[in-house]
Image: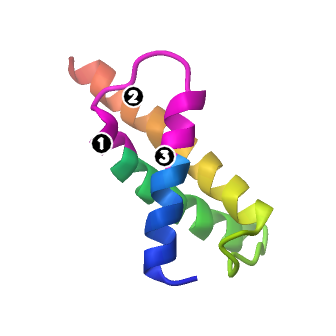
Amino acid sequence: MGILGWIVLGLLAGSIAKAVMPGAQGGGWLATLVLGVVGALVGGFIGSALFNISLEHFWSLQTWFVAILGSLVVLAVWGFVTKKRA
């Protein structure tokens, strides 16, 4: 999957993570979508490195699962960072 696929996947995973994550996170929808792209990349890297998950197909369920989990983790870390700053 190319970088454009990861961007689209990250945008959608960030939206899903924002809907799933309870509470108010810092930043608006644009920040959440950017964090979703970062989360998809981080989740894809960790998933392929630790669990040897092949992330070649955009429509694969495990690709979406790893991207959403990565987005949730990055969104939670962002929430902790912005909460301490405020």
Mark closest to the chain's N terminus, 1 or 2: 1
Q: Say which of marks 1 and 2 sits in front.
A: 1
Q: Residue furthest left?
A: 86
Q: Which residues are magenta?
A: 14-32
Mark 1 lies on a secondary structure that is helix
Q: Position of residue 53 (x, y in %)?
A: 77, 72
- Kind of residue indicated by mark 1: Ala
Residue 37: quadrant of the picture? bottom left
- Mark 3 is surrounded, within 10 Å at the Cα level, by few (under 14), some (14 to 19) or many (20 or more) other residues, namely many
Let me know if residue 25 is in the magenta part.
yes
Q: Which residue is mark 1?
A: 31
Which residue shows up at 58% across the image and 69% down it?
45
Q: Is residue 82 left or right of residue 62?
A: left
Q: Which residue is mark 2?
A: 79
- How is the model colour-coded? rainbow
Mark closest to the chain's N terminus, 1 or 3: 3
Q: Which residue is mark 3?
A: 14
Q: Is residue 18 left or right of residue 63?
A: left
Of 51 and 40, which appears nearest the observer?
Answer: 40
Residue 21 to residue 75: above or below: above
